[in-house]
Image: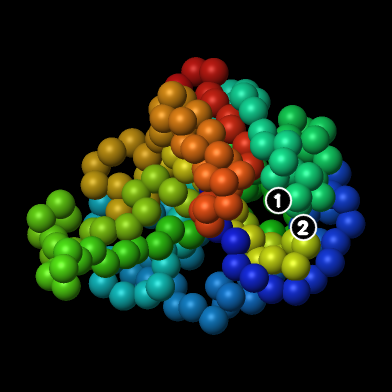
Amino acid sequence: MVMRPHQQTDSMETISNLDNLAKCVSYSFMDTLNADPDATSNGADHYPRQVFSGHYVPVSPTPLEDPEYVAHSKNLFRELGFADSLAQSADFMRVFSGNLAYVPEPMRKVGWACGYALSIYGTEYTQQCPFQTGNGYGDGRAISVLATVINGHHWEMQLKGGGRTPYCRGADGRAVLRSSVREFLAQEHMHALGVPTSRSLGLYVSKTE
């Protein structure tokens, strides 16, 4: 799971449960953007297709079966004001292993995936697009599930390996444990070196998948 920070101003208290986290929710930026008009409102959009317009595609993550806690970043938890116990709480694990069915309001039950354009030296690159048009480039297995304002910053919380999206190019939308651990460590190490990067909040694995 990765997080992308955007500066904003706000203050908060210690977050010890999902209801506390829900109080920090802010979709103010998302609400200025346009969803793909061809998308479904319930986020059931898990097969490769061309996305022609919109800033994002509403997508529901595919929950992990029998999720199990692996690790969390104590430094980032402290920075966000999260209690360490939150990482292994049932509600938090449920959300960050992809199940948004029971989130408290104003959290939303549908996440979102974003497309992107690819160019090399100013030349549009479409060879790796399954449609050879560039309309299939985007977050194939990364699904954002939450936008919050915490400690003066706007944080976008995203699941890496959250399941298939319209940009998945035929893959299963999952991330294997070894590469997830590598990315988890690399992000936190880069942050410690002062290099701006996305952050690693926690890591969960399926017992059966």
Residue nearest the observer in this picture, 22 or 177: 177
Q: What is the residue that sits farthest to the right in this orientation? A: 13
Q: Are marks 1 and 2 in contact (CB under 8 Å)?
A: yes
Q: Residues within 10 Å of mark 1 (few under 14, many from 20)?
A: some
Q: Residue at x 81, y 50 (%)?
A: 81
- Vertical relation: 124 (above or below) 33: above
Q: Earlier in the sequence, mark 1 or mark 2?
A: 2
Quick one: SS at disc 1? Answer: loop
Residue 103 x %, y %: 70, 51
Q: Residue at x 24, y 42 (%)?
A: 170
In this image, 209 relative to 106: left or right? left
Report which residue position mark 1 lands on.
103
Inspect this view and state whether residue 62 appears: no
Residue type beneath disc 1: Val
Residue nearest the observer in this picture, 194 or 72: 194
Q: Which mark is residue 176?
A: none
Inspect this view and state whether residue 155 appears: yes
Q: Residue at x 53, y 34 (%)?
A: 185
Q: Nearer the viewer, mark 1 or mark 2?
A: 2
Residue type beneath disc 2: Ala
In this image, 68 relative to 18: left or right? left
- Vertical relation: 76 (above or below) 136: above
- Report how far apart the C-alphas of labels 1 and 2 lie in the structure: 8 Å
Quick one: SS at disc 2? Answer: helix
Q: What is the residue that sits farthest to the top in this orientation? A: 208
